[in-house]
Amino acid sequence: MLFFSKSIIFLGILNVWFLRSNVRTNWRGGDSISLKDEFQFYNLPNWSFYIVGATKIVSALFIFLSIWIDNVPHKIFAVILSFLMIFAILMHLKVGDELRKSLPALCMLLLSIIVLNI
């Protein structure tokens, strides 16, 4: 289960931030077309897009690497990712999005909790 959770976290984050960042999805806040548009829709500063993206990618990478490298502090990165997912859910709620738009962030949060063995 841990291997599965870590792998899905990594592949999910890569999918969102590299493959689908400029593609309209059913999960974007409001009517945003791209991931960057979504951050603007939430009235977040431009720099937050890069900081959040880099933090999510690095966290997911280290969580994934911990499958093979025991010394990687994957729980720290799982906590960071958990907070970012909570923040994502709160952003959807802030703008009045349908609850279903928070589903990917909620799934990622649950996977991060599994990684934490809570």
Image (tube, helix red, strand yellow):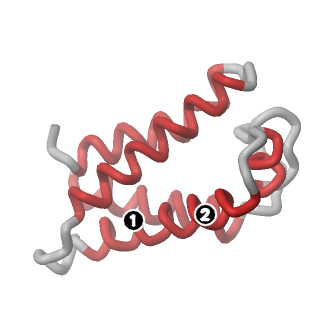
Q: Is residue 79 left or right of residue 53?
A: left
Contact, mark 2 vs mark 1 (Cβ under 8 Å): no
| Residue sitting at x 54%, y 69% | 54
- Three-letter code, disc 1: Ser
- Going from N to C along the chain, the mark reached first, 2 or 1, is 2
Dot 2 surroundings within 10 Å: few (below 14), some, or many (20 or more)?
Answer: few
Dot 1 surroundings within 10 Å: few (below 14), some, or many (20 or more)?
Answer: many
Q: What residue sits right under mark 2 in the picture?
A: 15
Q: What residue sits right under mark 1 in the picture?
A: 59
- Three-letter code, disc 2: Asn
46 in relation to 71, above or below: above
Residue 2 vs residue 40, the one in the foreground: 40
| Residue sitting at x 82%, y 57% | 23
Q: Is residue 74 left or right of residue 61?
A: left
Q: Quadrant of residue 61?
A: bottom left
Q: Quadrant of the C terminus?
A: top left
Percent position (x, y) of residue 111? Answer: 34, 45
Q: Is residue 1 left or right of residue 7?
A: left
